[in-house]
Image (tube, rainbow, N blue to C red):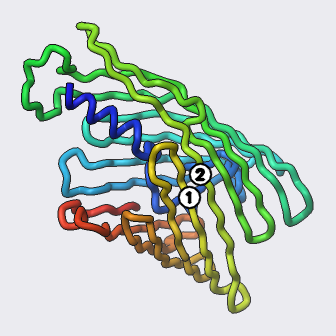
Amino acid sequence: MLFIFLITTVLANAQQIGMYSHFYFKPRVYNPAFTGAGEGIDAMLINRSQWTGFKGAPQLNIFSVDGTINKKAGLGVQLISDRKGLTNRIGATLSYSYRLMINDDMHLAFGVSIGAMDQTIDYSRAVLENNTDPTLFTTAEHTTTLDANAGLAFKWKALDIGVAVPQLMGNKVKYVDDADVRSFYTQARHYMGSVKYRIPLLEDKISVTPLALVRFLPNAPMQYDGAVNIGWQDKVWVGATYKSDYAVGLNAGVCIHEQLSVGYSYDFIIGTIGKYSGMSHEI
């Protein structure tokens, strides 16, 4: 039972929301209030590999499409695959936002998303000291739960401020096998805030965009990201990010054809774990 206790403790007290380096392009991955915030229809695919030096290292993937229904509403769909260790989550969410126009340069947006998540724990992949313990799962177990997020976003000219609550429902994810062995963890509510400001330079040929993201989960240390991105005419960008007590990240990207862009980020893991963690990168 020590193994189940450790797994439950980690899941209950750690950040459960994926850490993405390209959230500044698509803040909707965290906050549904930014649904339809761009012009026209936007699509984005993110692939993140983290700690490749470890067996069962996290692999996170998101495919997101969103756009405006009219000048006041946005609609989007997001598919997610999140695999790490013994766990695998696959799901889809539908998001909606509504803008309250204050004036031509300012609005307040409200957003909500709801979806389903299929969650699997494959205990057969675990390395156990005593694999004859009858109280342990020995096969893959899965369950499906509903998930919901809510958020607010305030925009004034080049300033964007957002607050969001992912995993709003706080559902308990339960696993029961044929022998009535039981295990569970709770999808804890997260509290997130972001701020971004675009500073135009040289007649708007160059832009400097500082941004910050804060994550808070009860009974876990607060995390924050601080970043600066420099862009040239929306054609090329470079940037750097500090992720609290975790990593220093560098990113770069280029518009390769009209509205099609590709970006890459690499995290230099800080602390002693960096010697063993391998690569952490994202495209």
Name the kind of residue labelled 2 in the image. Answer: Met
Label 1: element kind: strand
Where residue 192 sits in the image (x, y, percent)? 59, 51
- Identify which residue is drawn at 31% across, 61% down: 280
Residue 55 drawn above or below residue 120: below
Is 71 placed left or right of 182 in the picture?
A: right
The image quadrant that residue 205 belongs to is bottom right
Q: Nearer the viewer, residue 276 or 71?
A: 276
Q: Is residue 255 above or below residue 94?
A: below
Of 43 and 1, nearer the camera is 1
Q: Is residue 49 left or right of residue 168?
A: left
* Number of numbered callouts drawn: 2
Question: Which quadrant of the rendered structure holds the C terminus?
Answer: bottom left
Mark toward the start of the polypeptide (1 vs 2): 2
User: Residue 214 — which label?
Assistant: 1
Circles 1 and 2: CB atoms closer than 8 Å = yes
Tell me the element at label 2: strand
Q: Which residue is mark 2?
A: 192
In front of the other: 87 or 259: 87
Residue at the image point whose x is 41% and y is 68% from the top: 264
Q: Could you tell me if residue 103 is visible in this image?
A: yes
Quadrant containing the N terminus is: top left
Name which residue lies at 55% across and 76% down.
229
Q: CA distance from mark 1 to mark 2?
A: 6 Å
> Residue 106 in the image: x percent, y percent?
85, 62
* Residue at screen point 31% across, 35% down: 87
Disc number for residue 118: none
Q: Quadrant of residue 146?
A: top right
Q: Amino acid at mark 1?
A: Val
